[in-house]
Amino acid sequence: MELGPLLESIYLQYHYDFRHYSKASMERRAAQAMFRMNCKSLIELQEKVLLNAEAFFDLLQFFTVSVSEMFRDPSYYLALREKMFPILKTYPSLKIWVAGCSTGEEVYSLAILLQEEGLLDRTILYATDINPRSLAEAERGVFALGDVQKFTQNYQKSGGKHSLSDYYIASIDSVKFDRSLVKNITFSDHSLATDSVFSETQFVSCRNVLIYFDRDLQNRVFGLFHESLCRKGFLGLGTKETVEFSKYANDFNVFLPEEHIFQKIEKRGGVKRED
């Protein structure tokens, strides 16, 4: 399956750059999109999305991963709570970037942790994604009732101090999380493939996003995170992701290897500092 012409035309018309996403992953997603969008060929799919912006945003649902859950990998959140947040508490104010936030499960999880650790009121959370429909869902804070049991189990394993139900109101088939959790969250359209850094941060969490990028794009993204992080700031990645084999490997220490959390190395005068 030759995706080059389709991805190039999308970039030229809509300025969304998928040219450095994993080839195997994009081929699977394109095949799914062709089936669901009733296209018999890539050429037909290309014509459809170039002639109709709504069709392009339909395609975007397949090209961006929106499968997530609250407190996914609970040991990661427990490590943030017990190992990293005590360090972040030494800052008078915090800026945290959740890159590739999808429909918001991760950023709401972090907001709850920050609330329970007394940090939410002095934190600005930036939740970014390239998919405007996902961002709209994230800002609504509404999730399927059927997912809540798993969310609750994860929350308890992550060291939750209350009941997860304290943070939402349930209806017949969904739950809506309390708006107090989003008062310090800025939801924003941002592409890791084309956009630049917008703020200095103390913590960047980007989980299960980089696995869909090729090596060149991964290096670009690590460069963005390195530029964004303050000295000795933290970077949290997914369970199959690491900075260790990238061109920025020497710019980070491994802070918590089991949870794939890294810390930006403080450099003075070009000398690497280990303390």
Image (cartoon, rainbow, N blue to C red):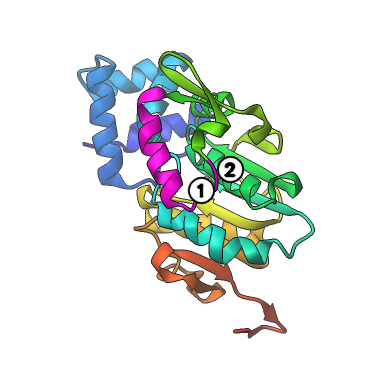
Picture disc at residue 160: 1
Kindly check if marks 1 and 2 are in contact, taking CB atoms under 8 A apart as contact: yes
What's under tag 1, amino acid-wise? Gly
According to the picture, the residue beneath numbered tag 2 turns out to be: 112
Q: Horizontally, is 9 left or right of 89 in the view? A: left
Res 239 quadrant in image: bottom left
- Label 1: few (<14), some or many (≥20) within 10 Å? many
Q: The magenta stretch spans which residues?
A: 145-162
Magenta stretch encompasses residue 49: no
Q: Which of 28 and 70 lies nearest the eye of the viewer?
A: 70
Residue 158 falls within the magenta-colored stretch = yes
* Farthest right residue in view: 92
Tag 1's secondary structure? loop
Q: Secondary structure at mark 2?
A: helix
Q: Residue 153, position in %: x, y?
A: 38, 42
Disc 1 or disc 2, which is closer to the eye? 1
- Name the residue at 58% across, 54% down: 204
Is residue 191 visible in the rendered image? The answer is no
Tell which of 222 and 20 is nearer to you: 222
Looking at numbered disc 2 in the image, what kind of residue is underneath it?
Ile
**Real-space Cα distance between discs 1 and 2?**
9 Å
Q: Is residue 260 left or right of residue 41?
A: right
The percent position of residue 55, horizontal first and vertical second, equals 40, 16
Q: Quadrant of residue 244?
A: bottom left
Picture quarter with the N terminus: top left
At 45% from the left edge and 26% from the top edge, which residue is drawn?
143
Q: 183 above or below 252?
A: above
Q: Residues within 10 Å of mark 2 (few under 14, many from 20)?
A: many
- Point out residue 261 in the picture as x, y percentages from the top left corner: 49, 64
Image quadrant where one finds the C terminus = bottom right
Which of marks 2 and 1 precedes in the sequence? Answer: 2
